[in-house]
Amino acid sequence: MDANVPKRKEPGKSLRIKVISMGNAEVGKSCIIKRYCEKRFVSKYLATIGIDYGVTKVQVRDREIKVNIFDMAGHPFFYEVRNEFYKDTQGVMLVYDVGQKDSFDALDTWLAEMKQDLGPHGNMENVVFVVCANKIDCTKHRCVDESEGRLWAESRGFLYFETSAQTGEGINEMFQTFYAAIVDLCENGGKRPIPNSSASFTKEQADTIRRIRNSKDSWDMLGVKPGASRDEVNKAYRRLAVLLHPDKCVAPGSEDAFKAVVNARTAVLKNIK
């Protein structure tokens, strides 16, 4: 049996769960937790030293839930402290700052760290993950848009919420959905419930949207080499159009990706005699 699979509980009984926060330093992990638990926002930045621990009780449907929250420091210096706390976790709050692209790009690194420290007997499929795109109140500095963050989360079967610890936007809804999913996990024998949205698009569609976002030019976007023939360009375009057309693809960012492909085809064909 996997070490981090919680025991099945009878409906109506109290339940104890363990939740951890992960993400780079200064993305607002502690502020999100304080906003939810204490209904306040602390504007002055106070770095988490190692681990902050708290307990709160919440009601989910007919159950009282005792939540043990481990708020983990994001600085690499505290890795030796963090690595002891991944085990026996039922819920993970993955946080990034929408105004810091590097904090979004680091999410894969955080998942890799957790997987490594759970070891061969741990199973991340038995954990509920919620991705918090935080600081959405700072609209002028935003560089990771909602579709990019949502695509990253939903393509992995994770929950996704846009949050602001400062204004409180999205915080209560996020925690309520998060805790309800953990209760569902416990009542389902430790198997993570899969959000409906994650089954509505394919990995190929998600990977293609990411590739288009990161393309360096129109040729790269279409997946053809400079100097390709008109037929080769049109063939590449048709394949992408079938894959990404908004009528058939509901992956976050598909509409923008489709428009980008249309524009890329037009630009490339202008240079082909």
Image (spheres, rainbow, N blue to C red):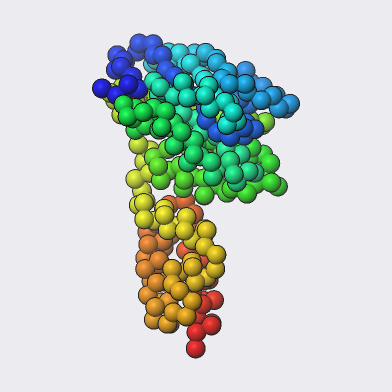
Tell me where residue 115 sits by quadrant. Answer: top left
The outermost residue toward the left is: 1
Rendering coords of residue 270 (x, y %): 53, 82
Image: 86 above or below 153: above
Query: Could one spot residue 189 in this view of the protein?
Result: yes
Image: 33 above or below 164: above
Which residue: 57% across, 31% down? 76
The outermost residue toward the bottom is: 273
The outermost residue toward the top is: 13
- In this rendering, position of residue 252 left or right of residue 171: left
Query: Could one spot residue 181 in this view of the protein?
Result: no
Rendering coords of residue 17 (x, y %): 42, 17
Assign the N terminus to one quadrant of the image.
top left
- In this rendering, position of residue 11 left or right of residue 80: left
Rendering coords of residue 181 (x, y %): 40, 28
Image: 177 above or below 261: above
Which residue: 67% across, 39% down? 137
Which residue: 29% across, 17% down? 8
Which residue: 47% across, 55% down? 210
How many numbered markers are drawn? Answer: 0
Image: 127 above or below 252: above
Which of 272/157 is in front?
272
Rendering coords of residue 251 (x, y %): 43, 52
